[in-house]
Image (spheres, rainbow, N blue to C red):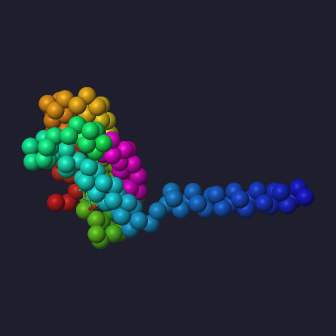
Amino acid sequence: MNTLCIGLAGSILGLGFLTVASAADPKPEDAVRYRQSVYTVIGWNFKPIGAMMKGEIPFDAAAVARHAQYVEMMSKTAIEGFPKGSGPDAVKNTEAKPEIWTDWNQFETKMTDFQQEAAKLVEVAKGGDQGAIKAQFGKTAETCKACHKEFRKD
Ligand code: HEC
């Protein structure tokens, strides 16, 4: 009876471990697909805010607030898409530069800057003030550019 229980617990734990192991150790091409998807969602939501700020489409405070929330949410998970060994030497269809992994602290700092500005954009967007949103949109966009300049192939 006891042995059976331990055996069962062991297999359940074993299965759990397998699941964790595969999630923590993704295939390089899956990591690339994940991060490109995350950035696709970020771009999808960031672009219309930019278009509103340029006056290309009408300003809509509720839409800005919603898009900003998606950008912020995705900013928190983007880093997970860059496990070691998922650089251009392992995967062809990536624009990630090898410097991400040789200069990881710098990359992480750029990611944190982005997260902070995206979080502020969510706050400012709630206020609905177009001028303040424009200023904070600009600051957030700077963090995209700063990282792309150093860590993404053009
Ligand atoms: C800390 C670094 C970093 C920040 C911050 C960042 N990006 Fe990127 N971005 C990357 C890297 C690296 C890639 C290339 C990923 C790949 O191809 O593997 C990328 C790719 C993209 C792509 C292309 C996705 C695809 O389908 O291949 C878009 C769009 C994008 N980023 C938009 C943005 C926007 C908009 C922001 C800011 C709101 C932003 N990024 C902030 C590093 C960053």
In the rendering, at what x and y percent does residue 25 appear? 49, 60
* Along the line of sight, the residue nearer the viewer: 82 or 66: 66
Residue located 25% across and 34% down the image = 125
In the rendering, at what x and y percent does residue 75 appear? 33, 45
Q: Is residue 3 left or right of residue 31?
A: right
Residue 147: tell me if it is visible: no
Q: Is residue 70 magenta?
A: yes
In the rendering, at what x and y percent does residue 130 appear? 16, 32
Residue located 41% across and 65% down the image = 30
Residue located 30% across and 42% down the image = 66
* Along the line of sight, the residue nearer the viewer: 129 or 96: 129
Magenta portion: prevailing SS class: helix
The span picked out in magenta is 69-83
Q: Is residue 115 magenta?
A: no
Residue 121 higher or lower than 40, as above or below: above
In the rendering, at what x and y percent does residue 121 appear? 26, 35
Residue 35: tell me if it is visible: yes
Residue found at the very far right of the displayed protein: 1
